[in-house]
Each structure stands twice: as structure tokens, then as C-alpha cells.
């Protein structure tokens, strides 16, 4: 009984000393792991830089489409009447890929704030998620507001056909919205982007707007076709802006990760050298002490 009690008392103490002691082998394994991670982050930074350069070149013509579609709403001062704008749709643009900072969370935060504002005033709100990352953020807290989820975004550069498919799904969903908005990250520079919101209007809202009276009589079919085309243009514009912002943010994030890995490698190398020197000094002391004893 006494022997068993002694084993129980002293076993945890010995085990604790082994766990807390940083051996040379442990430091070597950790150094190798961080160096491998640094190689991966540097490679990802180079890939993101190449994709960013291509996305920035494709962004300039896409802005022409988006600004042209939004010009009519601004010049005609189209607004939805507060008493009739009961149904609202929000299109959030993100992607399926991560490791790019707060790109997706900023869009989700803006969507949550707008949902709270609109539902507080008694309006019905539905959300279209462009990108699986956005769906993952909003599904738990705002799942009842999600109407459509669009995946396979971010693996390849967005095209006008992708925007057309999303617009078609929205128009064929049966949800007759009065007013809407598209929320995306607008590219500003390599290290800067801003989350913006652009308006969307239904065909009926545009047709009944007072600002449209400055134009000649417009055929209903022509106006409907223009509205569908404008919706695709604005979607394409938002997707291109979001993609460029995402690639620049990923490039910046991978650069920061590589720098942090370098700092950790320097600290671990210093710790490794100190530990190795301590081991050598200890062995020398033991040899000298043994020789002196003889």
C-alpha cells in the first residue's frame, strides 16, 4: 500500500518535468514546421499577386458597365416610396475562399446591420448570398432571411455569364421585391478597400417613379429588358470589385503571415542555440567534475 501511494505521489511530478522541458528535438521539429508553413505562405502570396494583376486589368472595363447602369438611377433620382417599399432584397458578394483578412466578415456585418434596420421598420427582407463564405457566416443567425445561395465563386475570375445566371435565378425565384441593394467590397488600392452598397429597383418602381417623367414614353418591354440588363451589369460590377479586393487582401495577408513566420523562426533559432549551448556546457561540467573527482 505504501509503495503504491509513493508511486502516485511522485509520478505526476516526474511527468510534469518532462512535459515542461523544451528539448532540442522539439525545437527542431517546430522549426521545420514553421519553415514549411513559410514556404506555403510565400507561394500563396505569389499566386495571389498574379491573380490580383489580372483582376485589376479586368476591373476597369467592368466599372464602365456598373457606373453606366447606376447612372440612370442617379440622374432620374429614382427612389422607392416608403409606404410601398415593403419587400427588400439584399445581394451580398463574397466568394468560397478564405485566408484574405476581413473581406467576408465586413460584407456580412453590413448585411446584418441593414437587416436589423429594415426589419425594425416592419419591412420584409430576403438575402442572396454570392459565395459560400457569406452563407456560412449568416446561416446561423439570419438563416430565415436567406433566399438563394450561389457557390463556386472565387475559384475562377467572375464572368458576365455568372452574373447573368445569378440575376436569372433571382428574377425567377418568385420574390417580387420593391427595392434592393447589393453590398460588396470596392477596390481602392493594393492595401485598401471599402464596403459599399448600391441600390437596386424593381421594374414597377422605376416605371412609376416621378423622375422617369423627364424621358419620353418608354415601352414596358423595353424598360423590363433594360432593368434586367442593368441588374446583370451591377452584379458583374460588384463581383469584379469584390474579386480584386479579395486578391489584394489575400496577397497582403500572406505577406504578413510570411513576416510573422520569419520572426518565429528567428526566435526559435535563438532558443535552439541557447539550449544547445546549455546542454554542451552541462556535459562539460560533468566531465570536468568527474575528472576532478579522480
Image (cartoon, grey):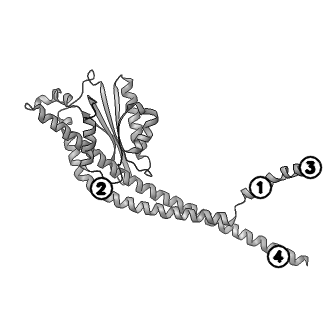
Q: Is residue 118 above or below residue 286?
A: above
Under circle 1, the secondary element is helix
Q: What separation in Å lies between label 4 and label 2 (alpha carbons)?
A: 67 Å
Q: What separation in Å lies between label 1 and label 4 (alpha carbons)?
A: 28 Å
Q: Is residue 220 above or below residue 155?
A: above
Asked if the residues shown at circle 1 and circle 2 are in contact, with their CB atoms under 8 angstroms apart, the answer is no
Position of 99 compared to 29: left or right? left
Q: Earlier in the sequence, mark 1 or mark 4?
A: 1
Where does the image place residue 233, in percent across and percent down from the top left? 22, 44
Q: Earlier in the sequence, mark 3 or mark 2?
A: 3
Q: Residue furthest front?
A: 1
Asked if the residues shown at circle 4 and circle 2 are in contact, with their CB atoms under 8 angstroms apart, the answer is no
Which mark is in front, 1 or 4? 1
Q: Tell which of 233 and 162 is nearer to you.
A: 162
The residue beneath circle 3 is 2
Splitting the image into 4 quarters, where does residue 31 fall?
A: bottom right
Q: Is residue 50 above or below residue 117?
A: below
Asked if the residues shown at circle 4 and circle 3 are in contact, with their CB atoms under 8 angstroms apart, the answer is no
Under circle 2, the secondary element is helix
Which mark is in front, 1 or 3? 3
Q: Residue furthest top?
A: 83
The residue beneath circle 2 is 56
Asked if the residues shown at circle 1 and circle 4 are in contact, with their CB atoms under 8 angstroms apart, the answer is no
Q: Earlier in the sequence, mark 4 or mark 3?
A: 3
The residue beneath circle 4 is 287
Q: Residues within 10 Å of mark 4 (few under 14, many from 20)?
A: few
**In the image, what residue occupies the spot 26% across and 43% down?**
165
The residue beneath circle 1 is 15
Q: Earlier in the sequence, mark 4 or mark 2?
A: 2
Amino acid at each position: 500500500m505504501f509503495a503504491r501511494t509513493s508511486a502516485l505521489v511522485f509520478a505526476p511530478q516526474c511527468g510534469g518535468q518532462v512535459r515542461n522541458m523544451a528539448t532540442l528535438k522539439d525545437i527542431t521539429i517546430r522549426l521545420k514546421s514553421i519553415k514549411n508553413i513559410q514556404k506555403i505562405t510565400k507561394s500563396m502570396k505569389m499566386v495571389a499577386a498574379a491573380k490580383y494583376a489580372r483582376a485589376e486589368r479586368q476591373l476597369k472595363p467592368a466599372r464602365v458597365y456598373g457606373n453606366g447602369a447606376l447612372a440612370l438611377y442617379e440622374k432620374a433620382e429614382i427612389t422607392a416610396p416608403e409606404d410601398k417599399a415593403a419587400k427588400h432584397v439584399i445581394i451580398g458578394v463574397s466568394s468560397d475562399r478564405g485566408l484574405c483578412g476581413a473581406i467576408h466578415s465586413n460584407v456580412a456585418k453590413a448585411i446584418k446591420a441593414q437587416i436589423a434596420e429594415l426589419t425594425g421598420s416592419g419591412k420584409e427582407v430576403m438575402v442572396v448570398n454570392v459565395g459560400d463564405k457569406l452563407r456560412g457566416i449568416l446561416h446561423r443567425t439570419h438563416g430565415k432571411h436567406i433566399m438563394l445561395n450561389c457557390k463556386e465563386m472565387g475559384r475562377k475570375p467572375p464572368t458576365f455569364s455568372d452574373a447573368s445566371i445569378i440575376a436569372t435565378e433571382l428574377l425567377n425565384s418568385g420574390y417580387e421585391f420593391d427595392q434592393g441593394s447589393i453590398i460588396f467590397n470596392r477596390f481602392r488600392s493594393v492595401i485598401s478597400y471599402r464596403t459599399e452598397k448600391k441600390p437596386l429597383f424593381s421594374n414597377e418602381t422605376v416605371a412609376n417613379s416621378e423622375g422617369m417623367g423627364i424621358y419620353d414614353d418608354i415601352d414596358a418591354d423595353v424598360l423590363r429588358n433594360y432593368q434586367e440588363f442593368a441588374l446583370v451589369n451591377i452584379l458583374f460590377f460588384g463581383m469584379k470589385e469584390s474579386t480584386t479586393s479579395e486578391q489584394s487582401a489575400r496577397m497582403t495577408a500572406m505577406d504578413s503571415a510570411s513576416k510573422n513566420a520569419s520572426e518565429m523562426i528567428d526566435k526559435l533559432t535563438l532558443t535552439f542555440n541557447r539550449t544547445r549551448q546549455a546542454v554542451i556546457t552541462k556535459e562539460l561540467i560533468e566531465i570536468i567534475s568527474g575528472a576532478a573527482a579522480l
